[in-house]
Image (spheres, rainbow, N blue to C red):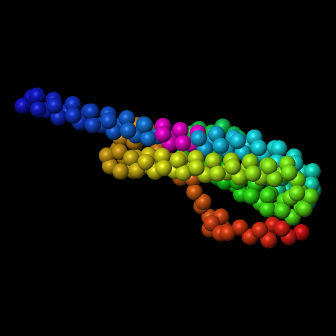
Amino acid sequence: MEWVVIGIVVALVLLVYGWYVALISRRNKAREALASVDVHLQKRFDLLPNVLKLVQKFMTHEKALMERLTQLRAEVGRDYAKADPAAVKGHLDAAKELEAGMTRLFAVAENYPELRSSSTIVEAQQSFAEVENQIAAARRFYNAAVNSLNNAVEIFPGSMIAGWARVQALPFYEVETAEARKAVDVDHYLKP
């Protein structure tokens, strides 16, 4: 009888340890996915000053937009604690706003014929579109990893073990406002 109790205790300890290992593995997979998003955000971060310098030569009327993009670039470039869900959310929100700003910048650039015909700007737009596609793929990978982590953290007995192991659910990378889900009205940005 004594061996049966010892066997049950050992089995429970191994089960809890196995669940703990799975939680930590999923958290690390989500961190890896977030790092992948950051690699592509860094590409955009590095591309942005060159685009702004090119556009600045032509667009004196859009100074506020370019200043905001520069400010957002600094916010996205800051270091943050990847384990803290609030810091991750803030980082992702700044990246989303930077993406929207760049989309606005290229929409506004369409209003300047000399800018639109510049081969350098066309190449910059193509590079930007390529980086955005890579970011979109990295976001899908991140959201899949976060989904797996969040399920493990929120479903019993993982919820108990996650609390003990200090593993928290992470935020998805998603569009949060109805305004952001609407189609872009390019005419709005092209008005003089």
In this view of the protein, which residue sits in the foreground, 34 or 120? 120
Q: Position of residue 127 (x, y in %)?
A: 74, 48
Quarter placement of the C terminus: bottom right
Image location of residue 90, percent across then percent down:
63, 49
Counting labels gives 0
Relative to 103, 87 lies left or right: left
Q: Residue at x 80, y 57 (%)?
A: 105
Image position of 133 (left or right of 168): right
Is residue 16 inside the magenta stretch? no
> Horizontal placement of 24 versus 32: left or right?
left
Q: x, y percentage for residue 103?
A: 74, 58
Q: Which residues are magenta?
A: 28-35
Residue drawn at x 30%, y 37% is 16
Picture quadrant where residue 162 is located: top left
| 192 w.r.t. 156: above or below | below
Give how far across and how far down residue 15 sits, in percent.
27, 37
The residue lying at 77 percent from left, 43 percent from top is 47
Q: Quadrant of the N terminus?
A: top left
